[in-house]
Image: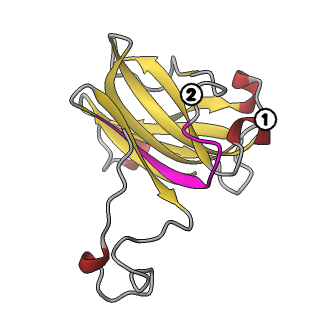
Amino acid sequence: TSFVSALVAGKTLWLFGTTPGWEAKEVRTFWSATPGVPSSWQNATVLSTSSTNISFTAFNTSPHKGTLDGKSVYALAIEWGAPGNIVGVPYTAVFAVKDATDDDLSTGWRLLDPERSVYRKDRYSACPTLRFFGGWWYVVTLFEDVANPKGKNCNSASTQFTGCLSSHVVR
């Protein structure tokens, strides 16, 4: 499994990720209430191209618990690279949810309509991180070619990391 993210629900550690490679067609979960015991881990497919009838390619994932339409849910941001008619400029995030009536995250996931519930289509926006706070859902992503307001010398080669931090918040 690639591009793994984690969440603790109840007393269980849940890991979410995609099948290995750059053409991932499944989002999988692995879980254990005793993660230090190798034989305790279980796994299941959460979403796949066959379960959604959409030929997607998936990458990074990010689970979180919050409220949607007045109901408690677990939500999962999933980075997609395809299909082009949904993604637009690769890459972007789509979202899946399941009712939070229990802490079993191995079943019950449904993809929100990716035509309506897509983060953005106009630019590269990879590596989604999903959070819920104060009644709002937040998606933090990596943007390509965004000028750093701290100056052109603030880049991946900079030795002044904290001095170069900038914030881009979209609500």
Q: Classify mark 1: residues with Cα within 10 Å, few (<14), some (14-19) or many (20+).
A: few
- Seen in the image, is 146 located left or right of residue 84? left
Name the residue at the left extreme.
Answer: 134
**Vertical relation: 4 (above or below) 139:** below
Task: Name the residue located 71 percent from the left edge and 44 percent from the top edge.
Answer: 88
Residue tagged 2: 117
The count of marks equals 2
Q: Which amino acid does label 1 sit on?
A: Ser
Q: Which mark is residue 55?
A: 1
Task: Name the residue located 62 percent from the left edge and 21 percent from the top edge.
Answer: 113
Marks 1 and 2, how far apart in space?
Answer: 17 Å
Q: Which mark is residue 33?
A: none
Which residue is nearer to you in this view: 10 or 126?
A: 126
Question: In the rendered structure, does residue 121 fall within the stretch colored magenta?
Answer: yes
Image coordinates of residue 30 in percent, x first then y, are 47, 39
Task: Name the residue located 64 percent from the left edge and 51 percent from the top edge.
Answer: 91
Q: What residue type is labelled 2?
A: Ser
Question: In the rendered structure, does residue 130 fall within the stretch colored magenta?
Answer: yes
Q: In which quarter of the image is residue 13?
A: top left
Image coordinates of residue 81 in percent, x first then y, are 69, 48
Image coordinates of residue 105 in percent, x first then y, are 43, 26
